[in-house]
Image: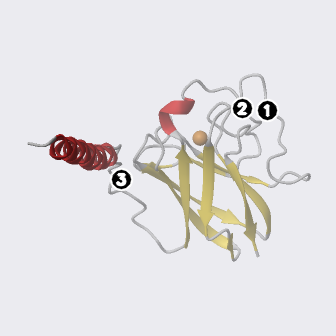
């Protein structure tokens, strides 16, 4: 074999190895995605859907924020976020990795997100109109565990409301949203 031929083989070999590495790299990253956390949402919810239903999604960024404090990524979203006055059933599903809950309160006069947060990381719940914090059941409880749903029906008159999660420090980190009743 000539020296040029040997060099060509070496180059081809290197290209082949790089190609293999690229392919296995893709396969690996696909594997990583495939083995990612999958949530099995429990099949439970209110049996009586006679009232207006609002779907509430409780979410977080999971393990990276387990330490708590001020670096949490938590969120609460309601669909729809405005309804007509009357009985409203809030169905709250936890798609995050932490326990959450749903409270319905009249909006603070200064707007949502302005409630005082105590040294325990919680707000004053005394004005709460309703709470869904039982895994796979209605009403207040010990929290909605990841992948489960809780619900509560409340009679709401026209006005501005705030939906929030009062697990310690979740409100302080943005786990609230505005809700309007017309
Ligand atoms: Cu929460």
Quadrant in which ligand 1 is drawn:
top right
Left or right of 133 on screen, residue 30: left
User: Is disc 2 in contact with disc 1, using a CB cutoff of under 8 Å?
Assistant: yes
Image location of residue 123, percent across then percent down: 75, 36
Residue 66 is situated, as x and y percent measured from the top left of the image, at: 54, 28
In the rendered image, residue 148, in percent from the top left (x then y), is placed at: 40, 48
| Residue picked out by circle 3 | 41
Which residue is located at x 54 percent, y 73 percent?
51
Residue 101 drawn above or below residue 69: below
Where 163 sits versus 71, above or below?
Answer: below
Q: Residues within 10 Å of mark 2 (few under 14, many from 20)?
A: some
Furthest-left residue in view? Answer: 1
Q: Dot 1 corresponds to which residue? A: 117
Question: Which mark is first along the chain, 1 or 2?
Answer: 1
Residue shown at 77% from the left, 36% from the top? 124
Q: Residue furthest right?
A: 110
Is residue 99 left or right of 162 when viewed as pictured? left
């Amino acid at each position: 074999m000539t020296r040029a031929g040997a060099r060509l083989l070496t180059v081809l070999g290197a290209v082949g190895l790089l190609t293999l590495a690229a392919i296995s790299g893709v396969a690996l990253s696909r594997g990583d995605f495939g083995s990612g956390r999958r949530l099995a949402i429990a099949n439970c919810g209110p049996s009586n859907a006679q009232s207006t239903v609002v779907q509430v999604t409780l979410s977080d960024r999971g393990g990276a924020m387990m330490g708590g404090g001020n670096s949490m990524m938590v969120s609460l979203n309601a669909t729809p976020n405005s309804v007509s006055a009357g009985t409203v059933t809030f169905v709250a599903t936890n798609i995050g990795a932490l326990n959450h809950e749903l409270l319905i309160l009249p909006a603070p006069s200064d707007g949502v997100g302005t409630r005082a947060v105590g040294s325990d990381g919680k707000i004053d719940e005394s004005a709460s109109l309703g709470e869904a914090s039982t895994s796979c059941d209605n009403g207040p409880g010990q929290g909605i565990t990841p992948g489960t749903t809780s619900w509560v029906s409340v009679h709401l008159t026209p006005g501005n409301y705030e939906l929030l999660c009062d697990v310690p420090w979740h409100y302080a980190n943005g786990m609230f949203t505005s809700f309007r009743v017309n």
